[in-house]
Image (cartoon, rainbow, N blue to C red):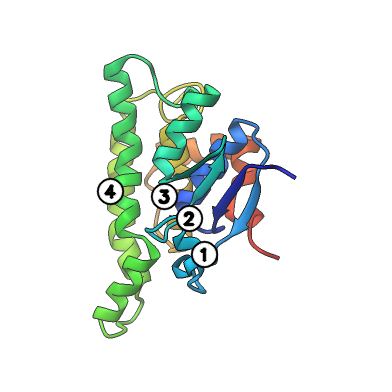
Amino acid sequence: MSDVILYDYWRSSASYRVRIALNMAEISYRSEVIDLVKGAHREASHLSRNPQGLVPVLDIDGLRLTQSLAILDYLDRTRNLNLLPNEPAERAAAQALAYSIAVDIHPVCNLSVARHATELSDGADDMPGSWMRHFIRPGLLAFEALLSGFKQAPYCTGSTPGLADICLVPQIYNARRWQVDLSDMPKLLSVEAACGNLPAFAAAYPDANAPT
């Protein structure tokens, strides 16, 4: 049994990112499901791992790591995943592309945020779906425009998958879940198709990790 443990939830975008990176690094791990829908992230056992009550949490190398971007950075630096360019200007541009999803779209479309918005709306029709679409589509349209500054060969920033791809693919999954129109985003869809052919991405797909 692997001594690497990922505390995650199958539909969590942040957990999805880390699953991709672990697969890219060929790290065997054991998944411990934290059921967000049932509120397991608020239980004392999980709060002892992460006082924020969030997933993922990764136990690796004698460490307990939280926050998906920090985990990705650790895996990149310790497993040489080459998720970002070395040249400072190129690195900053690639980070900005990834962060446009992980920092700007994802937090406001977190399930807890959408649920709170639903409560404040007195259960308005099509909530939280309308909330999700309101933020996801403009954010991905901006991502599509930002991709024009890079050559898809075939991934977001070059010939190997990087941080932007790891952030994009889970967000596309959420977009499809909430019926966001992606038909006018050909660059984004091209990247999705390329990533979909990689075993590391396919094995991390939420439906492949859903509890049975």
Q: Is residue 199 in sight in this rendering?
A: yes
Which numbered circle lies on residue 49? 2
Q: Is disc 2 surrounded by few (<14), some (14 to 19) or many (20+) residues within 10 Å? A: some
The image position of residue 28, as x and y in percent, is: 68, 39
Q: Is disc 1 surrounded by few (<14), some (14 to 19) or many (20+) residues within 10 Å? A: few
Type of amino acid at the residue the image marks with label 2? Arg
The image position of residue 142, as x and y in percent, is: 27, 43
Nearer to us of marks 3 and 1 is 1
Q: Which residue is mark 3?
A: 183
Nearer to us of marks 3 and 4 is 4
Q: Secondary structure at mark 3?
A: loop
Disc 2/disc 4 C-alpha distance (Å): 26 Å
Quarter of the image for the C terminus: give it.
bottom right
Q: Is residue 145 left or right of residue 54?
A: left
Type of amino acid at the residue the image marks with label 1? Ser
Residue at the image point whose x is 24% and y is 79% from the top: 120
The image position of residue 83, as x and y in percent, is: 45, 27
Quarter of the image for the N terminus: give it.
top right
Q: Secondary structure at mark 4?
A: helix
Asked if residue 96 is positioned above or below residue 119 in the image, the reply reads: above
Which residue is more in the foreground, 83 or 56? 56
Type of amino acid at the residue the image marks with label 4? Asp
Which numbered circle lies on residue 104? 4
Type of amino acid at the residue the image marks with label 3? Ser
The answer to which quarter of the image holds residue 69 is top left
Q: Are marks 1 and 2 in contact (CB under 8 Å)?
A: yes
The image position of residue 173, as x and y in percent, is: 49, 53
Q: Are marks 2 and 3 in contact (CB under 8 Å)?
A: no
Disc 1/disc 2 C-alpha distance (Å): 7 Å
The answer to which quarter of the image holds residue 54 is bottom left
Which numbered circle lies on residue 45? 1
